[in-house]
């Protein structure tokens, strides 16, 4: 493993991303809007009472945390990996004495840092204005950390194996649109998973999307507790393992296919 | 006496370019006090062009040629001076004026990319109010003169650069403009295609009396196509007249080419500037007025086998002007 | 004169040819339309699965707002966005440098920039939006009179003009600040118009009514159908959309003049 090379790459990528930070801030702004809309809609709906056990303040907390978690776990691999394959630039990466995974990780980390520079202050300001309610217990915080880590891992590798499909199909636009819609519905954006109606709720619990965004949020806010917490972690670990397996399998076959046909 | 078609009087264009110095302090300062630098792109130039003339604008990059062209096409507002084309003030951009002119930009395309050029032509015909019958006739003539064949039915993105330039020219002529502005139309084309396009432009000008104003860095374009050139350098008009007169007026020297039976040694007159010297041949540059005297001297002192006296090639003159500003 | 109409006709014809030059787009467009439609509807269904009214708005009336949003969005995608984007968008003429050709045409530049390119697939989105509106109106159960319909159509027209004006203004701003992703920012803000403006808190509501008036675009036409629209509000939004349109046109034309003085 080439650690020095990897670290240098991360630093360099971060610097170049900071150059274009206004571009990325605007991008982050665009991604923040859907959760914000539902923050307002649900908190207005819950005014003066509770919905599904959540007060107005609880909804505010839920969505503010969701905004941060969403940005932290957001998968950019379609551009950082998919485009490289489609352009043929992957060839260059395959020449380096380190796995292309480093390159993707470098852009991943660089991007996250730049987005956070924008998202965290904004979220803090919003929190000041909107008065969230948060009852934190030690267990919630302790459980949140692995939940968040796994969520990032899951979303990263899930995005990675999808991006690797670029080895075989030229345009994955439809897949991406479908995925975006599923994430919107089932990952806790349109509503916390607990409030989804029957069929959707079952789908959300079974499919991986909730575990990319919604689940860590629920852990921190205390919505997922006891059996739900354990079951959630089980699903999360299972889907993460599946994503990594898919990534490894597709990577090996993909590189063989790619180098066989000359990129 | 009838008025000239194009009358330009003291036309000027000055840009204000924000000054940006490197360094953090300078960037912070620029936040509350912007300093500007004035760039005098065109400085009070004047000329007249008659209908049907073919005129070449020459000059180094950044000299102001394209800026002048764009002012005449109405794309830019001048900072000072006047211009009238066919009685119109170009930058007022009256529709009746815009219907009289056309522009071709060498490195930019006005054709829609994914569909055949013919479709762009139809849109242009509609935009310029060209009646259907006239459109068919014009198109027929252009297909014939430019040898467009089946180029018009293929998507533009599948055409080679030369084929595309033919279509660009055709597109600009759909509405029979009275004045044609060509900004580097032969850029990047191979020699035979350049020649082909030059022939077409000359033929079209001859048939329809359309005024042609051309800028080009290829001397062949200017030499073959433009009996008259206007030289613009650093925004100023340095010369306006026949191309042949350019070297005479601006480069008062001649080249003497000698073929020698033995090397010349140091036996050369002082006033003669050596341009090139290889085994047996020698090229000298001398002042026009001294040509006769120096030629006589060379014939006396050197073992000359053959001698000829020439005007310097246009390229050399122009190069010299570009480098020195004048000669 | 008929000239503008003939021009529009040939622009539509040419746009169709352009679109069909690439086949793959059709299925992707279909999927995207359905997803956009589906997620919008499901959002409202999930919300009202938990509660009867939100801020005075019921399921049916909120659905009306969504219907207006989809309809106006379809009109925008039909010709306003494609045309303006071809000028000042990401791969637009101003960026690539072929804007000079457009300036050379003996046709008003603002007109060209606004109707030049059409995306007929948006008609499908329009149908979906109208479908939602019909379902919403049926569920509302209010008796629709001719007066209602006329008011609604007027409000819808004004909402569309307001949307056009905002997009035109953003387009004009590109002449001052080329790199800024104006349309991306606006799309984000416009998403908020899916829901009635009253659902948003005070400061944001003011922003969405007066600064970037997306509230005018969707909420007011919806109120015309639910019967809650006061004549004052209607007249107000008429004046507002006219003022916005005038201001945006002035801004855009100012941008053109700036381009003509500053560019080389």
Image: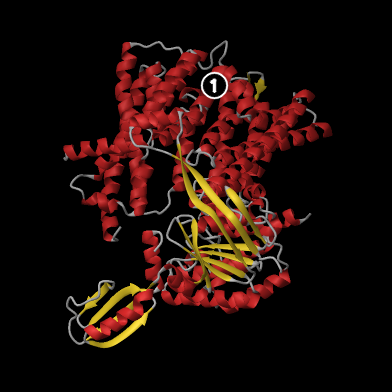
**Image height of B167 relative to C54, above or below:** below
On the rendered structure, is B319 left or right of C222?
Answer: left
Residue A45, quarter of picture: top right
Q: Quick one: B196 or C263, which is closer to the camera?
A: C263
The residue carrying mark 1 is A40
**Image height of B82 relative to B273, above or below:** above
**Image height of C172 relative to B241, above or below:** above
**Can you name the residue that lies furthest to the right here?**
C146
Chain where mark 1 sits:
A
Q: Which quarter of the rendering shows the N terminus of chain C?
A: bottom right
Secondary structure beneath dot 1 equals: helix
Residue ID at (21%, 36%) = A7
Q: Quick one: A164 or C238, which is closer to the camera?
A: C238
On the rendered structure, is A59 left or right of B90?
Answer: left
**Image height of C228 relative to B61, above or below:** above
Residue C43 in the image, given as x and y percentages of width and height: 56, 30
Residue A262 in the image, given as x and y percentages of width and height: 28, 60
Residue A36 in the image, given as x and y percentages of width and height: 50, 25
Q: How is the image coloured?
A: secondary structure
Q: Quick one: C162 or B94, which is closer to the camera?
A: B94
Say if residue A207 shows up in the picture: no
Residue B82 in the image, given as x and y percentages of width and height: 63, 53
Residue ID at (34%, 15%) = A140
């Amino acid at each position: 493993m080439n650690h020095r090379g990897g670290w240098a790459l991360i630093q360099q990528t971060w610097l170049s991303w900071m150059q274009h930070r206004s571009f990325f801030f605007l991008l982050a702004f665009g991604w923040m809007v859907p959760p914000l809309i539902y923050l307002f809609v649900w908190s207005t709906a819950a005014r003066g009472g509770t919905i599904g056990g959540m007060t107005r303040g609880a909804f505010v907390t839920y969505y503010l945390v969701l905004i941060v978690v969403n940005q932290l776990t957001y998968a950019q691999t379609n551009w950082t990996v998919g485009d490289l394959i489609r352009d043929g630039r992957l060839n260059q990466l395959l020449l380096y004495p380190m796995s292309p995974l480093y390159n993707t990780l470098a852009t991943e980390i660089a991007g996250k840092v730049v987005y956070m520079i924008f998202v965290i202050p904004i979220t803090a300001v919003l929190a000041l204005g909107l008065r969230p309610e948060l009852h934190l217990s030690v267990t919630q915080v302790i459980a949140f950390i692995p939940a968040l880590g796994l969520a990032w891992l899951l979303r990263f590798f899930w995005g990675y194996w999808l991006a690797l499909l670029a080895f075989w199909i030229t345009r994955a636009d439809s897949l991406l649109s479908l995925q975006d819609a599923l994430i919107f519905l089932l990952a806790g954006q349109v509503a916390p998973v607990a409030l989804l109606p029957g069929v959707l709720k079952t789908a959300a619990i079974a499919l991986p999307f909730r575990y990319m965004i919604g689940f860590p949020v629920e852990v921190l806010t205390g919505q997922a507790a006891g059996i739900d917490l354990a079951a959630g972690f089980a699903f999360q670990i299972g889907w993460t393992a599946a994503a990594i397996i898919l990534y490894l399998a597709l990577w090996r076959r993909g590189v063989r296919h790619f180098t066989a046909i000359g990129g | 006496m009838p008025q000239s078609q194009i009358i330009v009087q003291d036309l000027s264009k000055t840009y204000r370019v924000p000054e940006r110095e490197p360094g953090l302090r300078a960037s912070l300062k620029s936040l509350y006090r912007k300093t500007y630098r004035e760039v005098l792109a065109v400085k009070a130039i004047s000329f007249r062009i008659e209908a049907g003339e073919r005129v070449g604008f020459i000059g180094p990059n950044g000299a102001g040629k394209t800026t002048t062209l764009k002012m005449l096409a109405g794309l830019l507002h001048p900072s000072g001076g006047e211009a009238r084309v066919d009685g119109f003030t170009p930058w007022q951009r009256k529709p009746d004026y815009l219907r009289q002119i056309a522009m071709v930009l060498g490195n930019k395309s006005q054709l829609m990319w994914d569909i055949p050029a013919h479709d762009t032509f139809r849109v242009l015909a509609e935009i310029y109010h060209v009646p259907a019958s006239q459109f068919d006739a014009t198109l027929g003539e252009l297909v014939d003169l430019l040898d467009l064949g089946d180029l018009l039915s293929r998507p533009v993105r599948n055409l080679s650069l030369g084929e595309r330039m033919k279509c660009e020219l055709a597109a600009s002529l759909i509405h029979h403009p009275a004045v044609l502005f060509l900004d580097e139309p032969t850029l990047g084309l191979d020699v035979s295609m350049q020649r082909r396009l030059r022939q077409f432009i000359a033929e079209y000008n001859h048939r329809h009396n359309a005024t042609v104003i051309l800028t080009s860095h290829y001397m062949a374009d200017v030499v073959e196509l433009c009996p008259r050139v206007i030289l613009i350098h650093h925004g100023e008009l340095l010369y306006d007249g026949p191309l042949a007169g350019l070297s005479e007026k601006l480069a008062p020297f001649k080249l003497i080419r000698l073929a020698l039976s033995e090397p010349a040694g140091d036996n050369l007159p002082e006033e003669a500037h050596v341009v090139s010297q290889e085994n047996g041949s020698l090229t000298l540059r001398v002042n026009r007025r001294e040509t006769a005297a120096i030629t006589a001297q060379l014939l006396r002192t050197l073992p000359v086998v053959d001698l000829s006296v020439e005007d310097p090639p246009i390229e050399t003159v122009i190069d010299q002007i570009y480098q020195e500003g004048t000669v | 004169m008929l000239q503008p109409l003939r021009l529009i006709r040939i622009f539509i014809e040419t746009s169709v040819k352009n679109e069909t030059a690439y086949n793959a787009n059709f299925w992707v467009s279909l999927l995207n339309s359905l997803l956009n439609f589906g997620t919008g509807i499901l959002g409202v269904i999930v919300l009202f699965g938990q509660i009867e009214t939100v801020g005075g708005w019921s399921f049916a009336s909120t659905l009306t707002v969504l219907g207006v949003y989809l309809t106006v969005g379809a009109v925008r995608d039909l010709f306003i966005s494609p045309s303006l984007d071809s000028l000042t968008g990401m791969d637009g003429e101003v960026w690539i440098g072929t804007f000079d050709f457009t300036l050379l045409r003996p046709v008003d530049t603002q007109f060209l920039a606004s109707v030049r390119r059409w995306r007929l697939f948006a008609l499908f989105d329009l149908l979906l939006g109208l479908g939602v509106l019909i379902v919403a109106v049926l569920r509302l159960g209010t008796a629709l009179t001719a007066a209602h319909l006329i008011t609604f159509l007027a409000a819808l027209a004004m909402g569309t003009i307001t949307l056009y004006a905002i997009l035109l203004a953003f387009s004009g701003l590109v002449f001052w600040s080329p790199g800024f992703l104006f349309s991306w920012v606006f799309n984000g803000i416009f998403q908020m118009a899916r829901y009635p403006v009253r659902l948003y808190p005070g400061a944001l509501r003011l922003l969405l009514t007066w600064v970037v008036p997306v509230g005018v675009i969707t909420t007011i036409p919806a109120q015309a159908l639910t019967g809650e629209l006061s004549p004052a509000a209607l007249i107000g939004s008429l004046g507002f959309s006219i003022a916005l349109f005038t201001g945006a046109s002035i801004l855009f034309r100012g941008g053109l003049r700036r381009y003509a003085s500053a560019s080389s």
